[in-house]
Amino acid sequence: MNLQMHDQLFIIGGATSGFGKAIAEALLAEGARIIAVARGEEKLKTLQAAAPERVEILAGDLSDSAVIRQLVAVVGDRQLHGLVINAGGPPAKTVLETTLEDWDNAYRSLLRWKVELTQALVPKMMERQYGRVIYIESSSVKQPLENLVLSSSLRVAVVGMVKTLSQEIAKSGVTLNILGPGSHDTPAIDRIYRKKSEQTGLPVEEVREKAIALIPVGALGLPADFASLALWLLSPHSRYVTGQTITLDGGSVKSML
């Protein structure tokens, strides 16, 4: 299928690792142009070297308002076709282990900056009557995951914001959707295995094996699996899909919705 993304411009958050990197590479393979954002400048330069004429980079933390302002300036008056809002999660903790400071930090790292970035860039898409926005959250928004109360709670708030906005601007030509990954072979999943290892005294590798055995398809997902769906949602073909939360979890979520 021709995804019709050649020469379109996309912003990719967390572009040097995991899902962000896989999506960035997939977009480049389609002939798109990207603005790659991540904290580590050296890894960004490595990504840029693969297609220097089509990759712009911005080193910084998107939870920082100053970085968001920089990003808006980088886009300038150009048409922005798509935006991937993506960042890591908070520490793995139970409810009673958390402090109020943990909750304040989770609000800042999981919700606040996403609202700010959305408000900064979505109106620009609306002016052009076209745009695709993906928020990478977690399958925990449909079924809470053990030891991830901070992630589960604040990511649900993101879902509420995105669903509401998708209704408010449904006729604008801009779509907004959420992808909720389950267990994928990325660095982010290691914190979950380490936490379970601390609780049980089992070696991390044994915890990993037991967790994989519980996934109905019997394997971890790969970033490339995730990127394939993200790519379609970022394309013109997805014009009739908005306000949806789609989980990619190998069948782990048991919810009917």
Image (spheres, helix red, strand yellow):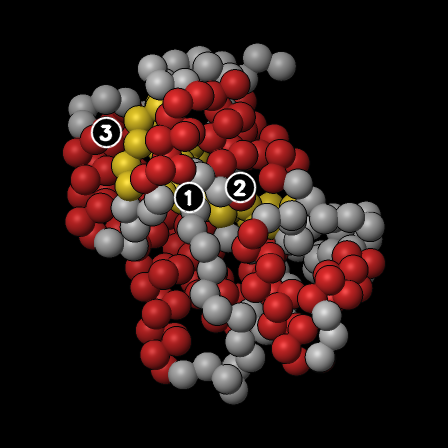
- The residue identified by callout 1 is 14
Amino acid carrying label 1: it is Gly
Other residues around mark 3 within 10 Å, as few (<14) / some (14–19) / many (≥20): some
- Percent position of residue 93, x then y: 53, 76
- The Cα atoms of the two marked residues, 3 and 2, are separated by 22 Å
- Left or right position of 45 against 218: left
Amino acid carrying label 3: it is Val
Dot 1 lies on which element?
loop
Near-viewer residue (213 or 216): 213
Dot 3 or dot 2: first in sequence order is 2
- Left or right position of 132 against 248: left
Q: Which mark is residue 75?
A: 3
Dot 3 lies on which element?
helix
Taking the view exactly as shown, the residue that stands out farthest to the bottom is 96
Q: Is residue 101 above or below residue 14?
A: below
Dot 2 or dot 1: first in sequence order is 1
- The residue identified by callout 2 is 19
Q: Which residue lies at the image location 42% right of the left edge and 29% below the top edge? A: 47
Q: Which residue lies at the image location 32% right of the left edge and 39% below the top edge? A: 41
